[in-house]
Image (cartoon, rainbow, N blue to C red):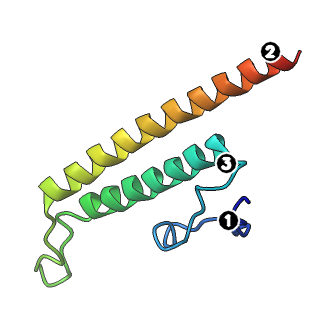
Amino acid sequence: MAQSCPKSAPVSKLSLKSEAHCADKMDMDLSAIALQGLQQADAQLNQAATIIASFGITSPDGAGLDTVDLSAEVIALLSAKTQTSANLATLKTADEIQKNAIDLIG
């Protein structure tokens, strides 16, 4: 018997990692999984870009507001790039699977 998974609301950037996901269901949608991965990569990219963009901002009294670990943020950017590439490849594969299924039916 297939496991029943509840429908979830649209994913917010803050709740991406905290939501429970059900990948063991019979009608798994590869496109939805890839799109969710793209959303996660986009959230990671935006967070790292925001942190990098804040580098060098000073307060009115001339003191630095925050220090930024640029190496960690570059790693986060590269990770987001890799995630994006992998999820785009998954989308392409899902498209090929759908085309082949249609060819088999028709």
SS of the residue under disc 1:
loop
Q: Residues within 10 Å of mark 3 (few under 14, many from 20)?
A: few
Q: Amino acid at mark 1?
A: Pro
Q: Is residue 82 above or below residue 64?
A: above
Q: Which quarter shows the N terminus?
A: bottom right
Q: Which residue is mark 2?
A: 103
SS of the residue under disc 3:
loop
* Residue name at image x 45 percent, y 58 percent: 43
Q: Nearer the viewer, residue 65 or 20?
A: 20
Q: Is residue 58 left or right of residue 80?
A: left
Could you tell me if the residues under marks 1 and 3 are in contact, i.e. CB atoms within 8 Å?
no
From the top left corner, tell me how far across and down residue 27 is, in percent.
Answer: 72, 48
Q: Which residue is mark 1?
A: 10
Q: Is residue 29 above or below residue 85?
A: below
Please report whichever mark, 1 or 3, sits nearer to the chain's N-terminal start: 1
Quadrant in the picture for residue 103: top right
From the top left corner, tell me how far across and down residue 29 is, in percent.
Answer: 67, 45
* Residue name at image x 53 percent, y 34 percent: 90
Quadrant in the picture for residue 56: bottom left
Q: Residues within 10 Å of mark 1 (few under 14, many from 20)?
A: few
Q: Which quarter shows the C terminus?
A: top right
